[in-house]
Amino acid sequence: MAKPLLLVDGLHTGYGSTEILRGVDFHVKPSEIVTVLGANGAGKSTMSRAISGVTRPWAGTIRFKDDAIERAQPAEIVARGLIQVPEGRRIFPNMTVRENLDLGAYRRGRSRRNVNRNRVFSIFPRLSERQSQRAGTLSGGEQQMLAIGRGLMAEPELLILDEPSLGLSPLLVEELFVLIKNINAQGIAVLLIEQNVVQSLEVAQRAYILDNGRFVLEGPAAQIANDPDLKRTYLGM
């Protein structure tokens, strides 16, 4: 069995005196898509922020490529190859598409920036057509492509996608999930944090369901997708 690329054990964290995550355990193997599902307020984004070093764990361990990273700074975590595409895209609206992409290689992949940019353009041809356009003038779907493309510029070994389908039209959502599968086919592990249950379970190998700061269910994505009682109890479907 392959050693986990990411291993989270007993993770507790929160904000101020409010605990959000109450002992989270999970793992992601190399070249795997794992989805974390849950309603608003379940703690999904807090979890991704803790893994990326933005929110400090109160207790527990986070290991990436078998190295402890729970006390590492975000820039150090990026340099190791764990890249987060945050909820809300967080692009720089007054900079061009090309400038936004090049910033993705600031900490990692700088020497291969041109090669990686061309790779991003091959995945997202619309970004190539708009590379001189200011990012703030792109459509919502194009901005999401840009945010993911910027993450790919850092040559991720694990790409965390936090609510990538949020605010997109149904047609763009379908396109997005095809792109996630294509990115994974290049050998990049993906941690997909989503509310979009149906498409997430279709592309992932394994799934975790987060409720009130704890995982209440985990297993093969196909098994969870095909169990109506589980979906009704934990996902409101």
Image (cartoon, grey):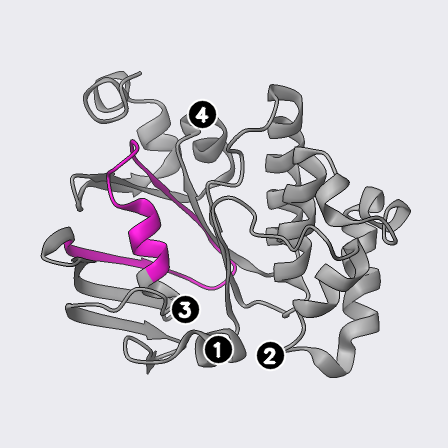
Asked whether disc 3 touches disc 4, contact meaning CB atoms under 8 Å apart, the reply is no
Decide: few, some or many residues near mark 3? Use Cα within 10 Å; few <14, some 14-19, many ≥20.
many
Decide: few, some or many residues near mark 4? Use Cα within 10 Å; few <14, some 14-19, many ≥20.
few
Please state if 237 lies on the left or on the right of 179 as rendered: left
What amino acid type is highlighted by mark number 3? Leu
The C terminus sits in image quarter: top left
Question: Is residue 28 rendered magenta in the image?
Answer: yes
The answer to which image quadrant residue 129 occupies is top right
What amino acid type is highlighted by mark number 1? Ala
Please state if 159 lies on the left or on the right of 69 as rendered: right
Label ID, residue 198: 4
Of the numbered discs 3 and 4, the one sitting upstream in the chain is: 3
Q: Which residue is mark 1?
A: 75
Residue drawn at x 67%, y 32% as measured from the top left: 175
Cα–Cα span, label 4 and label 2: 35 Å
Cα–Cα span, label 3 and label 1: 19 Å
Q: Is residue 150 above or below residue 89?
A: below
Q: Which residue is mark 2?
A: 107
What amino acid type is highlighted by mark number 4? Val
Asked whether disc 2 touches disc 3, contact meaning CB atoms under 8 Å apart, the reply is no
Q: Which residue is mark 3?
A: 5
Cα–Cα span, label 1 and label 4: 33 Å
Camera-near label (3 vs 1) is 1
Cα–Cα span, label 2 and label 1: 7 Å
Of the numbered discs 2 and 1, the one sitting upstream in the chain is: 1
Cα–Cα span, label 3 and label 4: 25 Å
Magenta range is 21-49
Q: Position of residue 96 (x, y in %)?
A: 79, 55
